[in-house]
């Protein structure tokens, strides 16, 4: 447990229980409601990670007011100076990486190797966005008139609201907060109620790096009480949500009423195509990691495997054999390969899809059961689950499950596989295993998704490229890379006429 977290004014200690406050205008404050909620370890619910503020609209109002005040000064700080704070935060995160990873495993459940990767992704995002502080490029272009200069510059938007999910509680918060503040915006963020501590730890690092008060404000609580007021607030000029497509429709509708910028990164049902000429050893390793990494709780999880009939049976047999051997348990154990579902509701959703798949006629060849004996009785555990002989139109092949349940679908050839892959409402990530470069480039062209991997599973995005998808996966904006810079800035076109006379642009053109 990181000592800075234990001794910081973010917490009140009642025995061994830590009570975390909201972070508003540089101060750690209790919610206006006087209410709190528990954050427990999903692998062992006897382990109380902390108690957090159950906030309401009044707390959002205070946070937005603080962010609005801070914006008047922060926007005038030169972008390279803003970026230096982010760079220093990266150095602090490196020092605290293992402590923050262990706390993340306790509150979210995924194994330590993955939570270390989550913190590392925040470090990577910090370094990348620190570099953007010395760029924030805009075009200069030739004017159509003599003695006239033309260019476009980026401007910050103002107060930005962020609503983040529980599956990557530090990484995704970093995707939103870091480009926003480098661009000169100020922020109010609501972390997921299942994983607030990891966002608090990120903001603690930024604060210790010298971020001025009010630039980032954290309000914990539940969606209707905190997320909706953030989206509705008149002084919030941009909203960024990572969550389900259902919640995205709600937030998008709210934002549209007042013409806010709105970035929605939503669901996925991601296909991994395996052709007859694929390296099967590599495809099986990728399939296991893509399907069962993070207990399948990724928007990019490999939830469908579309396998050409020539290798279908061999692929299934070998994948199932490996899936049955995966060690499930508490992620704090370095030997564990798959942790629990994040909470009971998610576990029940996962189990319900097992029943749906069986009722639809898919063949359950691996798993499908809750693990609740011995140490498992204190957590939300489930076996890695594999369905085979799945029809592409079955619900388990169409709907996002967000758990360790994978559907394997046979296909005739690449064209058939691509048709199956594209035949869903989502379009986030996709993958193809093949040794044929021509087929690889055909798939890159024809798979309708925001991300395509060749000879790798559907997970593994890097922070310096745009992240997001098509169709019900989002509304066209991207996180990561230049896509995030585009979202958190407004364009201003600038014309400087040094002709010392009135020029009427297109009107004065000589034929």
Image: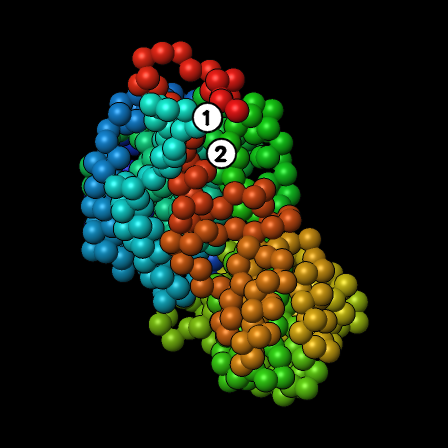
Mark drawn on residue 275: none
Q: Position of residue 368 (x, y in %)?
A: 64, 71
In this figure, which residue is indicated by the disc labeled 1?
A: 236
Height in image: 33 above or below 279? above
Quarter of the rendering containing residue 95: bottom left
Task: Using the image as rendered, state which of residue 161 and residue 75 is in the foreground.
Answer: 75
Q: Quadrant of the N terminus?
A: bottom left
Mark 2–mark 1 contact, CB under 8 Å? Answer: yes
Task: Using the image as rendered, state which of residue 300 and residue 226 is in the foreground.
Answer: 300
Q: Is residue 231 left or right of residue 503?
A: right
Q: Residue at x 59, y 35 (%)?
A: 252
Q: Residue at x 42, y 49 (%)?
A: 480
Q: Position of residue 292 (x, y in %)?
A: 52, 69
Task: Using the image as rendered, state which of residue 471 and residue 350 is in the foreground.
Answer: 471
Q: Position of residue 435 (x, y in %)?
A: 54, 81
Quarter of the rendering containing residue 357: bottom right
In this figure, which residue is indicated by the disc labeled 2?
A: 239
Residue 258: tell me if it is visible. yes
Q: Secondary structure at mark 2?
A: strand
Q: Secondary structure at mark 1?
A: strand
Check disc 1: other Cα within 10 Å, few if <14, some if 14-19, many if 20+. Answer: many
Q: Residue at x 55, y 55 (%)?
A: 450
Q: Residue at x 51, y 71 (%)?
A: 454
Height in image: 131 above or below 498? below
Measure the alpha-carbon separation of dots 2 and 1: 7 Å
Height in image: 107 above or below 337? above
Height in image: 334 above or below 482? below
């Amino acid at each position: 447990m990181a000592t800075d977290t234990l001794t910081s004014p973010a917490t009140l200690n009642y025995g061994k229980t830590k009570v975390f406050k909201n972070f508003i205008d540089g101060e750690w404050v209790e919610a206006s409601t006087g209410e709190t909620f528990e954050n427990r370890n999903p692998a062992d619910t006897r382990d109380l990670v902390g108690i957090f503020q159950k906030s309401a609209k009044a707390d959002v109002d205070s946070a937005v007011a603080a962010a609005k005040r801070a914006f008047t000064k922060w926007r005038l700080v030169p972008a390279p100076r803003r970026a230096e704070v982010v760079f220093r935060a990266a150095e602090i995160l490196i020092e605290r990486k293992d402590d923050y990873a262990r706390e993340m495993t306790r509150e979210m459940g995924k194994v330590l190797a993955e939570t270390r990767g989550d913190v590392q992704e925040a470090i990577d995002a910090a370094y990348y966005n620190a570099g953007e502080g010395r760029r924030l490029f805009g075009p200069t272009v030739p004017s159509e008139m003599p003695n006239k200069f033309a260019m476009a510059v980026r401007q910050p938007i103002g107060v930005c609201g962020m609503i983040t999910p529980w599956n990557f509680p530090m990484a995704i918060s970093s995707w939103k907060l870091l480009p926003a503040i480098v661009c000169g915006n100020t922020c109010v963020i609501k972390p997921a109620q299942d994983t607030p501590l990891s966002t608090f730890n990120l903001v603690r690092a930024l604060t210790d790096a010298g971020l001025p008060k009010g630039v980032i404000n954290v309000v914990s609580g539940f969606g209707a009480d905190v997320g909706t007021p953030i989206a509705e607030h008149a002084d919030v000029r941009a909203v960024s949500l990572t969550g389900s497509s259902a919640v995205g429709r709600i937030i998008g509708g709210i934002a549209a009423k007042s013409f806010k910028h709105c970035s929605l990164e939503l669901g996925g049902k991601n296909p991994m195509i395996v052709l007859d000429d694929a390296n099967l050893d590599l495809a099986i390793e990728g399939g296991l990691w893509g399907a069962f990494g993070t207990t399948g709780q990724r928007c990019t999880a490999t939830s469908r495997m579309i396998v050409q009939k020539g290798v279908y049976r061999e692929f299934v047999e070998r994948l199932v054999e490996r899936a049955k051997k995966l060690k499930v348990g508490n992620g704090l154990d370095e030997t564990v390969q798959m942790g629990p579902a994040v909470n009971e509701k998610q576990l029940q959703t996962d189990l319900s899809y097992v029943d749906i798949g069986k009722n639809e006629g898919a063949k359950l060849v691996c798993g499908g059961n809750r693990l609740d004996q011995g140490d498992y009785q204190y957590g939300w555990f489930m076996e890695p689950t594999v369905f085979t002989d799945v029809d592409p139109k079955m619900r388990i092949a169409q709907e996002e499950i967000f758990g360790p349940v994978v559907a394997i679908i046979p296909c005739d050839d690449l064209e058939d596989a691509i048709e199956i892959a594209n035949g869903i409402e989502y379009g986030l990530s996709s993958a193809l295993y093949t040794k044929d470069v021509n087929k690889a480039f055909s798939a890159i062209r024809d798979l309708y998704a925001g991300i395509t991997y060749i000879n790798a599973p559907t997970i593994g995005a890097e922070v310096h490229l745009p992240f997001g998808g098509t169709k019900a996966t989002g509304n066209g904006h991207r996180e990561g890379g230049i896509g995030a810079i585009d979202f958190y800035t407004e364009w201003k076109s600038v014309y400087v006429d040094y002709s010392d006379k009135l020029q009427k642009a297109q009107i004065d053109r000589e034929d």
